[in-house]
Amino acid sequence: MPTTLTPDGFDWSDPDDWLAWFVGVPLRVLIIVLVGTITLAVLRRLIRQVTEHIAEGSSVLTSSRLKGIGKTEVGAALLKANPLANARRGQRARTIGSVLRSTANILVGATVALLVLTEVGVNIGPFLASAGIAGVALGFGAQSLVKDFLSGTFMLLEDQYGVGDTVDLGEVVGTVEEVALRVTKVRSIDGTLWYIRNGEILRTGNMTQEWARASVDVRVAYHADVDQVREVLRQAIDELEADQVLSTYLLETPEIFGIETMSAEALLLTVRVKTRAGMQWEVSRALRAGVRTHLAAAGIPLAGAQQIVVLDHSPAASPEDPPAHAPEVAPAASPTEKRPQAQENKGSPA
């Protein structure tokens, strides 16, 4: 009868030897893989739940008594009130979720692989040394790429800007169309789509975050009645507050500031109002239109509107011939200024 023993004493026909072999290395490897798989599944589930809460705008720690509010008609209307904010929040959640899932896969997968290699008797020291050297080389070779990814991650976590925001990134001013880990897409006013690496963004000015301020400067003539001008500005403000649509954009009552600057040509008065984010331009346009209408109705000219300069380019006339037409004089001329000779002799006998 042929023997079934191996050189190390293992009997292929003995179930006890199979059981002893299985409870050794194979069982430990199986447990490592099973624990790693369960850990990865739990982490991915937690990440998915957190990102879904972020995308929906609800709190992860919401109590059970408040969970049903989002399912009501009022809750649904509140969630859909700002589509830009929802799109921005959803994109940020998806990007963060993708980063977290990739990080979890790499960390758990690498840990499981190293533990399995250790159990089967492989020396992982050279692997760790090679991985360290490769990591250093990759860090030096792709440091700009790593910088872009890290900057993009912190921008998303800090919520510096999002889809639909109007931002000033230094050389580019426009509306954000997409925010990724490496680049940000910004559409400028002239329609140009700019691709900006996140690592190159040194400063960010967000014009549509939280709240904004609409400011309108009104320059009137120096001799204008300031009290009358303030009354006209108040009428324009009242008209703005009476508008059913624009009044919803106002967060505070508009303020009329006194004379900001004063010169020989003009007086500068300013109207400022705190508005909802992104609505300052529409409020400013409506306020300017109202100020112009009420100033015209009150007969108050803007600075410079009362001065008219007429230049006479006709050839010089003979002293014996009267001029074809007398030049017009600007209405703003001082009464003490000496009149032209042609005006003084007008009406005198020939």
Image: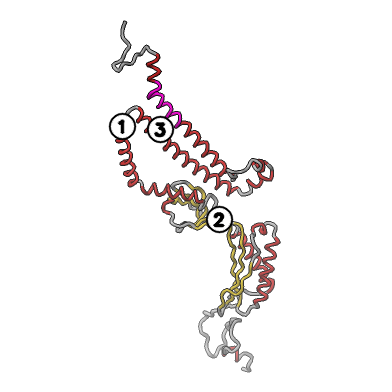
How crowded is the residue under tag 3: few (<14 C-alpha within 10 Å), some, or many (20+)?
Answer: some
Q: Residue 89, how many percent across, how many down?
A: 55, 47
Residue 139, quarter of picture: top left
Mark 2 or mark 3: whose residue is earlier in sequence: 3
Q: Which residue is at 32% across, 28% downward?
A: 121
Q: Amino acid at mark 3?
A: Val
> In screen coordinates, is 349 left or right of 99?
right
Residue ID for mark 3: 112
Q: Which residues are magenta?
A: 22-36
As measured in the structure, the alpha-carbon distance from the residue carrying label 3 to the one carrying label 1 is 15 Å
Q: Residue 190, how many percent across, how many down?
A: 51, 55
Q: Is residue 10 above or below residue 316?
A: above
Q: Residue 216, how many percent across, how many down?
A: 60, 67
Query: Is residue 26 located in the magenta-colored stretch of the structure?
Result: yes
The C terminus is located in which quarter? bottom right
- Are discs 3 and 1 less than 8 Å apart at CB? no
